[in-house]
Image (cartoon, helix red, strand yellow):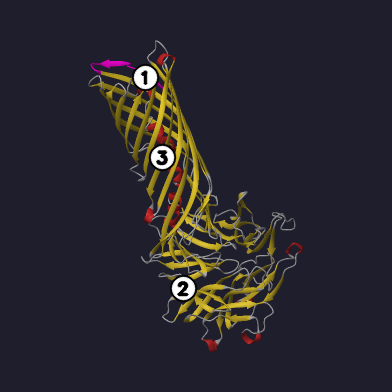
Amino acid sequence: MAAALMATTALVAAPKAEAQSRFDRIYGLPNEPSSILSQAMSGNGAYVVGLLQASGSGLWRATRWDSGGNAVDLGADIGANSYATGVSWDGSVVVGYSNFISMPGAFRWTEDGGLEYIGSLGGNRSMAYDVSNDGRIVVGFARRGDGTDTRFVWIKDATTGVVSNPQMHEMLSATGAINVTLGGISGNGRYTTGQEYPGGTPEAYRYDISGIQGGVVSHVALGSLGGWETNPYDISDDGTVIVGAAELDAAGGGHLRAFRWVEGATGGYNGGSMYELGTLGGDESAASAVSGDGRVVVGRSESAAGDDVAFRWEEDTGMLSVADWLRRAGVSVDYTLTDAQATNSDGSLVTGTMLNDDGEWEIYIARVIADTGPNPGSGIMNVAEYQSTLYGAAGIANAGEFLTWLPMNGAHHRPLMLTPDLSGDMCAWATGDFAHYGQSGANLALAEAGGCVDLAGGAVRLGGAVGTTASWQALSLGGAANMVGQYVLGEVDWQPDGTPLLLSVTGMLGGWNAKVDRAYSNGAATAMSSGQTNAMGGVVRVRADWLEAAKIGNTSFNPWASVSFGALHVDGYSESGGPFPARFAAQNLGHTDIRVGVTAVTEFSKDTRLSTTLELAHRTGTAASAVGQVDGLFSFSLGGGTYGQTWGRLGLELDHRVNDAVSLSTSVHLATNGRDPTVAISAGIKGAF
């Protein structure tokens, strides 16, 4: 299934309730619409192989894409152009070639083993064109030691090939012709197709290569549609159906027409096996590929207006434009689809070339899949946008991280011993926080109540609290991610006798329920897929404060440092609703947070003071990811890995003692871009008894 197609962007489309469809466009280089070429598609429809232009050198790179448009460079040598031309049924094996000047370039790439050059027939050139479904048999052209280029069949682990390359066998001509061509290989690896030019007249054949290890290759002539030339381009998995383009006889004007050859059939041209497939109103057509089961043919046809139009043919419908095939499934297509170059095992997926609104050539991938569930939806969805919404939904892990750390750096940004001194050995408090992250637009809130007791003559303070926290964030296109839950917190403060040190350990553990409404474009409308999950997280912080390390007038300076360790688990979940609900895998995140700062405490009176804090924070940890599956379409893996961020924070806190038993506090914190809220405010009341 060879092609030369171009693309830069991606779309997906779904039809009405009777079927589920996609309409994709695969990315190339930004602002370079000719930087990507497609050559073949795996039988399962999950992969496309072809070329992607390197941005630095401008050389073409053999590449494999999955259904989500994610590219894998096959690792061919970088000193020359490389081409991916064929792919196994499951996409795990890709073949192609590099155009080295003086060495064989045919290669076979596997997911497990990477790229392997498979040599030649003794000369210095080779090119691999196609591969069997199981990836074990490769066909192509190679140079012999005498400088002649001829066809080869490479069989993994074979020992009967040429002396210099026992896995590669020379495929001899059926007619003795030197000028020959090669088409594809059947999925079962038994048959291949091609042309020979004995006496300068082209003849098309199907070759049985199952006996090539014993030196036997048989052949069957395909015949013609009455004209001079027959070009076979592709062959079904079992080798019984071959498609291509052939010239009509003089009565048909000698035009080139798409054909379908069926082994043993007698209802074709002149009672033979060759069937003309017609056109979409114009004079000419050509078939590029056939489905693995042989039932569906795709290619290009001339329209009545003389334009090239992508077609899909099957016996029940005859020849339809790919656009009309999609429209019958409920998918609105406004683009000009000019050809169809490849299809999958059952013909439910077609790929080819389209003309976008800017007049640029791109690759499309269209599919219609039988209904796999209720209300699969309809319309067109932008894949790049869709994947960004997947990552946005997985950002619930970021919100979980923020909620886990909110009590530590919000309500408990300072040890309990640094709250206003009141009469009594026991205390109780209530605190409320609000925080906003400017970059993501996330909002957080906290409400907490707790109590403390002083021991060892006031040298030790034990505290505990319970609280509830919530977050809410607007996602793109009207989506939303909300979390709500509760936590418990405990703290131990100790000021060793005779020292200015205050040592504290604070820990919290919380659990939250999350609801995500993920919105994405669905044609002119917006679709929504929703899911719910649970998260659990905790933090332990160790902190040391040097009290009144320096004093100027009525202001004391108190340096401090802390180190904290946090963890968060988010359960996996499945969405419902919308045309493309997704399944998300569980996430486990870990974080380490280090802070140093200084707090200047200014006493305005014996009852009122202002604390000004400058701090530098650095956090490393696991980044949120979106890993999962869009059922029936593609898997995804976005984000993840690790991160490290450093930022600064400024805090102002006003404490006022109403009387010996009651105090009020309010604070505001501002942070540069990091893991702390951009702005956070807090207000609390404390009582002693």
- Foreground residue among 184 and 321: 321
SS assignment at label 2? helix
Label 1, secondary structure: give it: loop
In space, the residues marked 3 and 1 are separated at their CA atoms by 30 Å
Say whether residue 547 is magenta.
yes
Q: Earlier in the sequence, mark 3 or mark 2?
A: 2
Q: Which of marks 3 and 2 is in front?
A: 3
What residue sits right under mark 3 in the picture? 469
Would you say residue 608 is visible in this rendering?
yes
Q: Is residue 147 visible?
A: no
Q: How crowded is mark 1: few (under 14 residues within 10 Å), some or many (20 or more)?
A: few
Residue type at tag 3:
Thr
Q: What's the distance in space between the residues labelled 3 and 2, CA to CA?
A: 48 Å
Disc 3 to disc 1: CB gap under 8 Å: no
User: Amino acid type of disc 1?
Assistant: Gly
Left or right: 498 with respect to 231?
A: left
Q: Residue 424 carries which label?
A: 1
| The N terminus sits in image quarter | bottom right
Mark 2 to mark 1 CA distance (whole Å): 78 Å
Magenta stretch in the rendered image: 544-554
- Residue 148: % across, % down: 63, 63
Residue 382 point in image, percent of width and height: 42, 60
Amino acid type, residue under disc 2 in the picture: Arg
Residue 327 image label: 2
Quick one: 272 or 551, which is closer to the camera? 551
